[in-house]
Image (cartoon, rainbow, N blue to C red):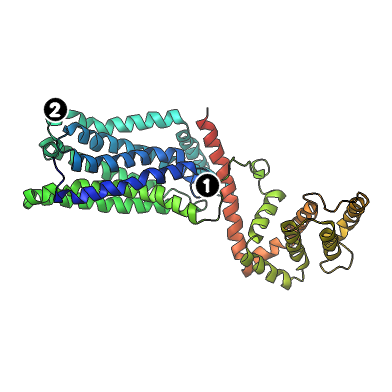
């Protein structure tokens, strides 16, 4: 059957849907990026792949497959969609458990015996066999009503079969099931922890609920219009299928497109391997605090804020010495440059004199003498690393506690909390990935 003017809405969706494969590829390709990895991308990719298949096949059948058997349309509407929704909800439940466990690790003082028992129960959702069993049970409950199809209807041309009593009645059942599942999505979203949700997962799920609710209303209105108005003029437009496909796009947009866009605009780089955090063994240890401080000071506005506070405390020298080391590390590590830095920061009564510099002066003096005797023109890599680490440790112990109590330190307190939450979340996420590989 030829393509007609009434096919324009579905034809537009067919063309539009081809953005989905490359975007999904980018999503999976950068699964370890911080804007994506906390969404459990390997699990999320499964329902998103199904929504993508639906978004491409549904317009294809409506535009080019009007004479094809209705079986294809029946399968993608009454079996493919429920499978996608169930896997979507299972993944959301896993994220809820992941975040709840992370919150418990961050704030053990907020835990109660009831909360701990509940998390012990919920953690079974992190095991693939449990997920498969649960998904199978729910899916059987959802798709059982759709096994009542008669072969004669399924062999009708899809343009005719879509208007049959079988399709109309089962669509009503499917809409009811989608409404129930949507409320499950909303309910689970409220349990995503505020404390560790640094990338807006709660907002994504709640936006999904609102947008799909609107789609359900529009599909319902279109079906009512077909019953009450001149169906011969409206039916060829396939408006219920049009809005159903829009719904699949909404799922894909909020859970694949937005994270990929955030990845493209963020300053983070996708790591090649999973880094093991120092806090896995000693939470809140000095190395973790130094790492947080180093990240905080890497941004110029934040460095200036800390420097302003340090000026009030008459302790600007450690920060300025850190900046001098950064300048040295970014340039040519020549012996002359290293000597100048020692003269600036480590010699007694120097320009940037610090307690740390006074203690390390003898060590660096001897190192420079050895390098001169060896007639080397450059100092070895990481020459000032011990000095840098000791400066960071001094700042963490002497300045950071007072800085966090000062109004200028509000941003640092929020930044430190976010970094710690990300670290604990990485610990739990690593455990989930380890379970997946068993």
Q: Nearer the viewer, residue 390 or 346?
A: 346
Residue appearing at x 65%, y 54% in the figure: 292
Give the quarter of the figure containing the N terminus: top left
Label 2 or label 1, whichever lies nearer to me, is 1
Asked whether residue 155 appears in the rendered view, the answer is: yes
Q: For the image shown, how many numbered marks are present on the structure?
A: 2
Residue 360, given in percent of the width and then of the height, sits at 86, 56
Please state if 350 lies on the left or on the right of 257 as rendered.
right
Asked whether residue 107 appears in the rendered view, the answer is: no
Measured along the vertical axis of the image, is residue 298 above or below residue 96? below
Measured along the vertical axis of the image, is residue 418 above or below residue 173? below
User: Which structural element holds mark 1?
Assistant: loop
Please state if 196 lies on the left or on the right of 129 as rendered.
right
Q: Quadrant of residue 415?
A: bottom right
Residue 220, given in percent of the width and then of the height, sits at 18, 49
Q: Nearer the viewer, residue 367 or 103?
A: 367
The residue most toward the bottom is 312
Measured along the vertical axis of the image, is residue 291 above or below residue 151? below
Residue appearing at x 50%, y 45% in the figure: 38
Distance in Å between CA atoms under marks 2 and 1 = 48 Å
Residue 421, given in percent of the width and then of the height, sits at 57, 50
Q: Nearer the viewer, residue 256 or 416?
A: 256
Q: Which residue is labeled 1 in the image?
A: 33
Measured along the vertical axis of the image, is residue 154 above or below residue 61? above
Residue 206, given in percent of the width and then of the height, sits at 37, 52
Q: Quadrant of residue 416?
A: bottom right
Please state if 112 lies on the left or on the right of 314 as rendered.
left
Label placed on residue 150: 2
């Amino acid at each position: 059957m030829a393509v007609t003017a009434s096919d324009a809405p579905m034809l537009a969706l067919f063309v539009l849907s081809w953005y989905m494969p490359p975007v999904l590829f980018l999503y999976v390709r950068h699964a370890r990026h911080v804007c994506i990895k906390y969404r459990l991308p390997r699990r999320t990719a499964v329902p998103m792949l199904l929504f993508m298949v639906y978004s491409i096949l549904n317009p294809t059948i409506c535009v080019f497959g009007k004479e094809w058997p209705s079986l294809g349309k029946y399968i993608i509407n009454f079996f493919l969609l429920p499978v996608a929704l169930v896997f979507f909800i299972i993944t959301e439940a896993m994220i809820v458990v992941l975040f709840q466990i992370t919150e418990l690790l961050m704030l053990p003082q907020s835990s109660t015996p009831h909360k701990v028992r509940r998390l012990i129960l919920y953690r079974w959702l992190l095991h693939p066999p449990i997920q498969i069993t649960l998904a199978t049970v729910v899916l059987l409950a959802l798709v059982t009503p759709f096994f009542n199809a008669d072969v004669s209807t399924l062999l009708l041309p899809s343009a005719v079969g879509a208007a049959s009593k079988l399709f109309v009645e089962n669509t009503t059942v499917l809409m009811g099931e989608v409404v129930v599942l949507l409320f499950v999505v909303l309910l689970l979203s409220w349990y995503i922890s505020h404390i560790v949700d640094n990338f807006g997962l709660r907002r994504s799920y709640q936006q999904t609920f609102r947008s799909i609710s609107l789609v359900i209303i529009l599909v319902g209105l279109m079906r009512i219009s077909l019953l009450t108005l001149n169906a011969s003029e409206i039916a060829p437009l396939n408006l219920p299928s049009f809005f159903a496909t829009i719904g699949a796009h909404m799922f894909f947009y909020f859970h694949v497109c937005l994270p990929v866009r955030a990845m493209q605009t963020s300053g983070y780089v996708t790591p090649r391997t999973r880094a093991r955090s120092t806090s896995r063994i000693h939470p809140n240890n000095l190395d973790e605090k130094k790492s947080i401080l180093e990240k905080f000071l890497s941004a110029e506005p934040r460095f200036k804020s800390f420097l302003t506070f340090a000026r009030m405390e008459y302790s600007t020298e450690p920060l300025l010495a850190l900046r001098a080391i950064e300048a040295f590390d970014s340039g040519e590590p020549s012996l002359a440059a290293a000597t100048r830095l020692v003269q600036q920061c480590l010699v007694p009564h120097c320009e940037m004199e610090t307690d740390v510099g006074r203690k390390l002066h003898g060590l660096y003096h001897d190192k420079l003498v050895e390098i001169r005797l060896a007639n080397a023109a450059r100092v070895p890599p990481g020459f000032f690393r011990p000095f840098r680490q000791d400066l960071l440790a001094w700042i963490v112990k002497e300045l950071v506690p007072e800085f966090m109590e000062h109004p200028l330190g509000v941003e640092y307190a929020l930044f430190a909390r976010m970094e710690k939450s990300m670290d604990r979340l990485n610990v739990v996420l690593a455990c989930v990935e380890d379970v997946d590989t068993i």
